[in-house]
Amino acid sequence: MTDPGPASSHTGHDHSLPRKLTTIFCADVQGYSALVEADEVATVGRLKLYRADLIAEIEQHHGRVVNTWGDGLLADFPSPVEAVFAAVAAQRRINQRNAALRTEQPAAPLMLFRIGINLGDVMVDGTDLYGDGVNIAARLESLAEPGGVCISGAVFEQVRKKLDFGFDFIGSREIKNIAEPVPAYRIMVEGSAPAKASQPPVTPQPEPASGRPAQAGEAAQTGEATQADEATRIRKWRQMAWRFAVLGLFLLLINLATSPRSLWVFWPLLGFCLLLMMRYPMGVHPRVMWPLWRRD
């Protein structure tokens, strides 16, 4: 992807520039340099047609083209929903063009666009946009599959209950000069979600700079489940121990009543002890098992 120029290279904090919250749409062609090297004239001609499709969908969905460079395009939308609609519609139009080209020229290489969309705060300088919001959109575009659309977690939260597209979480990604990883989602361009978009995958919590997951709620639930499982194993072992103790006492009384000079009761008692040792809950300290008078 060619450098987008001022739209995303400005990283300072110029307080003299106005700011706005907007949806940034970034697109480029996968493997454009190789296409140009193979057939420069045909590639540039096709790029004009495909870019016209992109611009038509952007304008139809109330977006604004901010900048174009080489094979790339930057636009912004007042609505994340409109931006996603425009991206999916554009990819489908381009796929139709590629299908027609493949029918006419089976050996011709396909031209596939990647699109990244982010919702963020940007600085406005005339018609140009600057800031982290633009940089994140460009990074998401590079994560998108050829012919695909990749959106940030901020966009996902705005569109997940409004659109029936399929969404696939692809992880939280590190982005240069951005303190926290950005959750990224892939949109299923050629199909809708198997369930309504009101039942999306849960957005994972961003990971802190240290790289350890910030999922305290999930960790707490996991800890509670582990403690409950351990308590169940302890309770079952204690119940078995009490049963063996009562059975051993009963056998001892029989032994003393029938043959006090031959204490055969030690053999079943030894078997009970071995069985208790084999069934002892792994990882549980003996002090946790007792006192015996603890109610279960």
Image (cartoon, rainbow, N blue to C red):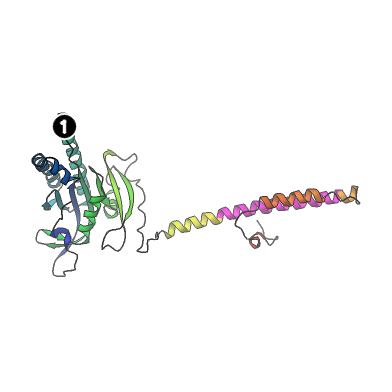
Q: Look at the magenta stretch and give its main secondary structure.
A: helix
- Of residues 49 and 247, the one drawn nearer to the viewer in this rendering: 49
| Residue depicted at 24% across the width and 57% down the height | 136
Asked if residue 130 is among those painted magenta in the image, a careful observer would answer: no
What amino acid is at disc 1? Ala
The spot of residue 28 in percent (x, y) is 17, 48
Looking at the rendered image, the quarter that the C terminus falls into is: bottom right
Residue range corresponding to the magenta coloring: 228-254
In the displayed structure image, the side of residue 281 where residue 210 appears, left or right: left
Q: Which residue lies furthest to the top in this view?
A: 103
Q: Residue 168, position in %: x, y?
A: 32, 46
Nearer-the-camera pick, 159 or 1: 1
Q: Residue at x 15, y 42 (%)?
A: 35
Residue 170 location (% of width, % of height): 33, 49
Q: Is mark 1 on a helix, strand or loop?
A: helix
Q: Mark 1 points at which residue?
A: 100
Within 10 angstroms of label 1, few (less than 14), some, or many (20 or more) residues? few
